[in-house]
Amino acid sequence: MKALLICPNERNGVAALAECVPLANVSLVGKTLVEYWLEHLAGLGAQEVLILAADRPDQLHAEVGDGARWGLRVIVKADKRERTPEEARASHQASDPTPWLPAPNDVILMDTLPTLPQLPLFTSYADWFAAAQAWMPRALTPDRIGVRESNPGEWVGLNAHVAAGAKLIAPCWIGERAWIEAGARIGPNVVLEREVFIAHGAEVSDSVIGPETLVGQFTEVRNSIAWGSTLINWRSDSYLKVPDSFLLCSREPQRARPPPGKTPAPAHTLLPVMARFHEYVSRLLT
Amino acid sequence: MNINQQDGTLSVTGLRELNATNARAFRSTLARALSQDLKAIEIDLSHTQAVDGAGLGALVALYETAKERRKQEGFALRLTHPTPPVQQMIELARLHHLFEVSHPESTPDGTRPAIDLK
């Protein structure tokens, strides 16, 4: 059985997010959108999936590979523009004698999560945030190795570190290898994606923090989507690139990979700056 | 950047950016403009498109000066009409806990209230 996925290309409602990552690759509670759809199609009995990608197909291919992870044969095809499902059916299905999954699962535009068709993802930042929140309690599936619900509504991923003095407020999702320092306050309505670093004293509420993002000491992120240095307020649609890495940045350039068994030293190059900022703000707040 | 003083209030307008390129000059200019009879500083951020850590530092330094003044003379600092990205930076750095943050949309007559120093 065969199926076809269409990657969303440009969406004005979430343009700043699409600058950070192709929308099909956007991480939502620990997995990318395309991963959720491939899992879904594999569960419906698909064996081969063709993915049409107009936006950065190389990144999509790097994400899904040949599909063996899902027991699928996946082919990523670069396209010049985003096709409608009708166009895709006409150009790829009509002349293909291979059996396809029955409609509507034969050709899917990845604009929603598989079991939440009523919640559009890319019409606005607020809609994207609402979908992420709705997905959170559904995300603890049996294939999520190492994820535990430490308290009702508090999900903590594999190898995530929550310091003793940190506070989690449900609902919140702490992604794999996330690191939360003492004095941080996370929640409610927060998703931290994988390898997020929350520094001492930072507060995050009603927000999604993208993969490998550093939230600096004593900062406050609320009503926001933070993706590397991009900070989007999903209520006001305002966004900016934060110019100071000690406030908010991608961990990728600063990260030092520790030897196996050693405690990671995330963003160690920023610590002196962050410490000064912390001292400065805490002095003013007292 | 334009600076005017009237009735004990120093008003700063036309500030297009407040970052590493002009934060030092901003601080020194305002420091020079402080006079003994000054009761308030009002900074209009409606045209300010970019603020960074240095700019926030300049605001905090101004806050500290105002705080010192306030102890003795009831000094006030007001930030008015911050643009959305500037407001985001202020909130990210938690300076809205130091300054009273205005919410322009909440005013019934559509005017934007000032941000008063706590």
Image: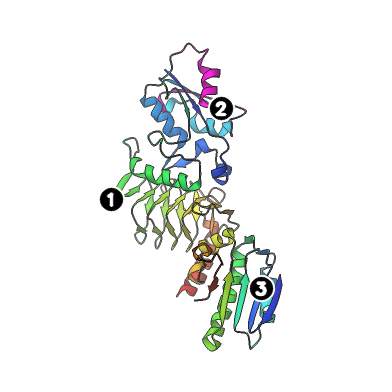
Please say whether residue A82 is one of the residues in the magenta stretch: yes
The subunit letter for the residue under badge 2 reads A
| Left or right: A262 as drawn, with respect to A140 | right
Please say whether residue A233 is one of the residues in the magenta stretch: no
Disc 3 designates what residue? B12
Residue A83 numbered tag: 2
Q: Amino acid at mark 2?
A: Arg
Rendered view: B63 above or below B46: below
Rendered view: B18 above or below A149: below
Badge 2 or badge 1: first in the primary sequence: 2
The subunit letter for the residue under badge 3 reads B
Tell me where the magenta segment starts and ends, as one range: A70-99
Q: Secondary structure at mark 1?
A: loop
Q: CA distance from mark 2 to mark 1?
A: 42 Å
Where residue A242 sits, quadrant-wise, is bottom right
Q: Secondary structure at mark 3?
A: strand
Residue B80, image x and y in percent? Answer: 59, 69
Residue B10 numbered tag: none
| Left or right: B93 as drawn, with respect to B51 | left
Q: Amino acid at mark 3?
A: Val
Disc 1 designates what residue? A152
Q: Are marks 3 and 2 in contact (CB under 8 Å)?
A: no
- Picture residue at 45% right of the left edge, 75% below the top: A286
Residues at marks 2 and 1 on the same chain: yes
